Image (cartoon, rainbow, N blue to C red):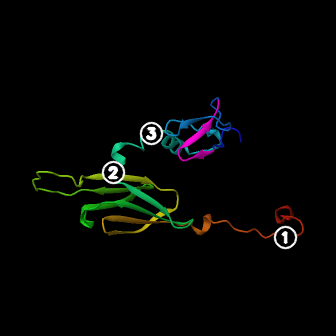
C-alpha cells in the first residue's frame, strides 16, 4: 500500500526526500498532503478536503478550549470550558453529522477592566457515521457533551453458517 501508510508522532512526520517512509527531517502536518490514493475511496471527497485544509484550525475555532475524551471504543465526551455561561446561554444542535455549539450572552455592564473572557462563540465538530449525542451537562464552567457510537443491527458484522453439499442456488 505505497502512498497510504503514514507514520505520525505528535503532529510531525519523519520524511526524507518527500518520502514519509524514510527517516529524515520533520514536516508540518498542517500543510502536508497525505497523498492517499483517492481512487480507492468512493464518496469520501469531502472528508479528504476537510483533512487537507487548514480551515479547521483557525483562531475562531480555538475558543472556547475543549477536550475530547475517549471513554471506550463507543463512548466519547467533548468538554468545553465555558465559565460564566449558563445553560440558557448555550445552544447545542446536530444537523447533517455536524455537532454545533453556540454560546452567547448579553452583558450590559460597563467595565473599567475586563480580563475574564465571556465572548460569544461557535464551535463545530464533524461526527462519524452512527455517532449520536446522548446528553449534555454544565457543571463548574465545563460543558460536557456525551457521544455514543451506535451501530444499527443491520450494519453489525454477522457470522455466516457454512453448510456441506452443493450450493442451494445451483440446485435451483
Which of pointers 1 and 2 lies earlier in the amino acid sequence? 2
Left or right: residue 48 compared with residue 114: right
Query: Which residue was labeled with disc 1?
Result: 163
In three-dimensional space, the C-alpha distance between marks 1 and 2, rounded to whole angstroms, equals 59 Å
The numbered mark, 3 or 1, whose residue comes first in the sequence reads: 3
Measured as percent of width and height from the top left, residue 120 is found at: 25, 52
Q: Position of residue 26 (x, y in %)?
A: 57, 36
Residue 130 versus residue 47 in the image, above or below: below
The part of the chain drawn in magenta is 7-16
Q: Secondary structure at mark 2?
A: loop
Q: Is residue 67 left or right of residue 107?
A: right
Mark 3 — residue?
54
Dot 3 falls on a residue whose secondary structure is loop
Determine if the magenta segment contains residue 60.
no
The answer to which image quadrant residue 162 occupies is bottom right
Could you say which disc has been placed on residue 103 in the image?
A: none
Disc on res. 63: 2
Most common SS among magenta residues? strand
For residue 68, side relative to residue 166 (left or right): left
Amino acid at each position: 500500500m505505497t502512498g497510504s501508510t503514514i507514520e505520525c508522532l505528535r503532529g510531525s512526520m519523519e520524511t526524507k526526500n518527500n518520502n514519509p517512509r524514510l527517516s529524515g527531517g520533520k514536516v508540518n502536518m498542517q500543510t502536508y498532503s497525505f497523498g492517499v490514493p483517492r481512487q480507492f475511496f468512493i464518496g469520501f471527497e469531502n472528508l479528504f478536503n476537510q483533512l487537507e485544509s487548514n480551515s479547521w484550525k483557525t483562531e475562531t475555532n480555538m475558543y472556547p478550549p475543549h477536550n475530547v475524551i475517549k471513554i471506550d471504543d463507543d463512548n466519547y465526551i467533548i468538554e468545553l470550558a465555558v465559565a460564566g455561561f449558563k445553560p440558557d446561554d448555550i445552544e447545542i444542535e446536530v444537523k447533517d453529522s455536524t455537532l454545533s455549539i453556540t454560546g452567547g450572552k448579553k452583558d450590559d455592564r460597563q467595565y473599567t477592566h475586563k480580563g475574564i473572557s465571556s465572548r460569544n462563540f461557535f464551535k463545530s465538530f464533524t461526527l462519524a457515521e452512527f455517532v449520536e449525542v446522548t446528553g449534555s451537562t454544565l457543571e463548574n464552567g465545563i460543558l460536557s457533551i456525551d457521544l455514543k457510537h451506535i451501530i444499527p443491527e443491520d450494519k453489525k458484522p454477522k457470522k455466516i453458517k457454512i453448510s456441506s453439499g452443493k450450493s442451494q442456488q445451483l440446485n435451483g
